[in-house]
Image (cartoon, grey):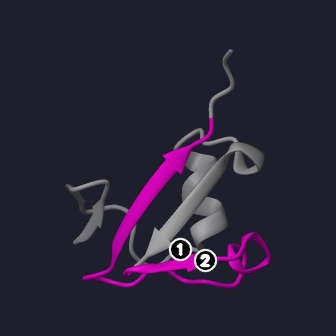
Amino acid sequence: MVKVNGQALDNAAGISLSDFLKREGYDLSRIAVEYNDDIIAKFMYATKIIEDGDALEIVGFVGGG
């Protein structure tokens, strides 16, 4: 089980962070990811493999004015 934004998911472990984010429909240029309490640099998304027990917080950037 992996926690994503506080919600438990059973189908996130074992794939790269990049693949997970794309599968879930995130625009990689408009988000930041906290992975087990650490901010992950975008260049690491493709090589970081999500493991059982991990916790992700994904925040999106929005414009306005």
Q: How many marks?
A: 2
Is 25 left, or right, of 27 in this rendering? left
Q: Look at mark 1 in the image and give the residue it sits on.
A: 15
* Magenta run includes residue 21: no
- Disc 2 residue crowd, few under 14, some 14–19, many 20+, Cα 10 Å: some
Residue at 80% x, 76% y is: 43
* Magenta run includes residue 57: yes
Q: Position of residue 1 (x, y in %)?
A: 22, 72
Residue at 32% x, 80% y is: 54
Question: 16 or 4, which lies in front?
Answer: 4
For the residues marked 1 and 2, what is the alpha-carbon distance in whole angstroms? 16 Å
Q: Look at mark 2 in the image and give the residue it sits on.
A: 40
Q: Position of residue 55 (x, y in %)?
A: 32, 73
Specify start and end residues of the magenta stretch as a single range: 36-61
Q: Position of residue 26 (x, y in %)?
A: 61, 42
Residue at 50% x, 49% y is: 59
Q: Quadrant for the C terminus, please.
A: top right
Is 63 left, or right, of 36 in this rendering? right
Q: Position of residue 11 (x, y in %)?
A: 34, 61
Identify residue type, mark 2: Ile
Identify residue type, mark 1: Ile
Question: 17 or 62, which lies in front?
Answer: 62
